[in-house]
Image: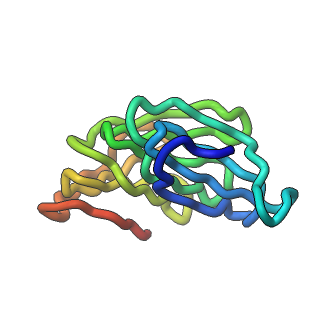
Amino acid sequence: KGHAARLCSVAFHPTGRFVATTSFDHTWRLWDVETSSMSQGKQLLLQDGHAREVYGVGFHPDGSLVATTDFGGVVQCWDLRTGKSACHFLGHARRVVCSEFSPNGFQLATAGDDGTIKIWDLRRRRPSASIPAHTNLITQLKF
């Protein structure tokens, strides 16, 4: 059981109880790592809302949202209480491979192949800044 293609990223929920994984199979999954055996986590959620390979994943500081990024340039924020997409962002010209929520949870930073860092305002659900940071791939972000 699990992903049908290459595993891309893993992120721990702020509580440490859950793990999110992303894959080239166009899905991300949420696993319970505390209530399962050591050899296999219990899958809690399977999401297939991306049209391209899902690469980046990160949790909101309060644990209520998870952000996923894909090779089509799409960023999705998912509500873990409902399991549904809460919002999505378009604005990158190429693959988006990483995301990071701000410590206060009001912004989301994303980056990837287009060399830009985008800062998204989660309350207004729109971009608040675009930083032309590099000429190549950006693989990590940290607030």
Query: Taking 120 as reference, is 10 left or right?
Result: right
Spot occupied by residue 28 in the image (x, y as percentages of width and height): 56, 43
Task: Tell me the colour scheme of the image.
Answer: rainbow
The quarter of the picture where the C terminus appears is: bottom left
Spot occupied by residue 100 in the image (x, y as percentages of width and height): 46, 59
Of residue 38 and residue 78, the one placed in the foreground of this image is: 38
The quarter of the picture where the N terminus appears is: top right
Spot occupied by residue 84 in the image (x, y as percentages of width and height): 63, 31
Q: Is residue 15 above or below residue 93?
A: below
Q: Residue furthest bottom?
A: 142
Give the mark count: 0
Query: Taking 50 as reference, is 59 left or right?
Result: right
Query: Taking 104 as reference, is 2 left or right?
Result: right
Q: Residue at x 71, y 51 (%)?
A: 31
Q: Is residue 33 above or below residue 66?
A: below
Spot occupied by residue 108 in the image (x, y as percentages of width and height): 44, 53
Of residue 79 and residue 137, the one placed in the foreground of this image is: 137
Q: Residue at x 33, y 42 (%)?
A: 71
Of residue 104 and residue 58, the one placed in the foreground of this image is: 58
Tell me which corner region of the image, top left, top right, bottom left or bottom right, holds residue 54.
top left
Q: Residue at x 33, y 35 (%)?
A: 90
Q: Residue at x 28, y 51 (%)?
A: 129
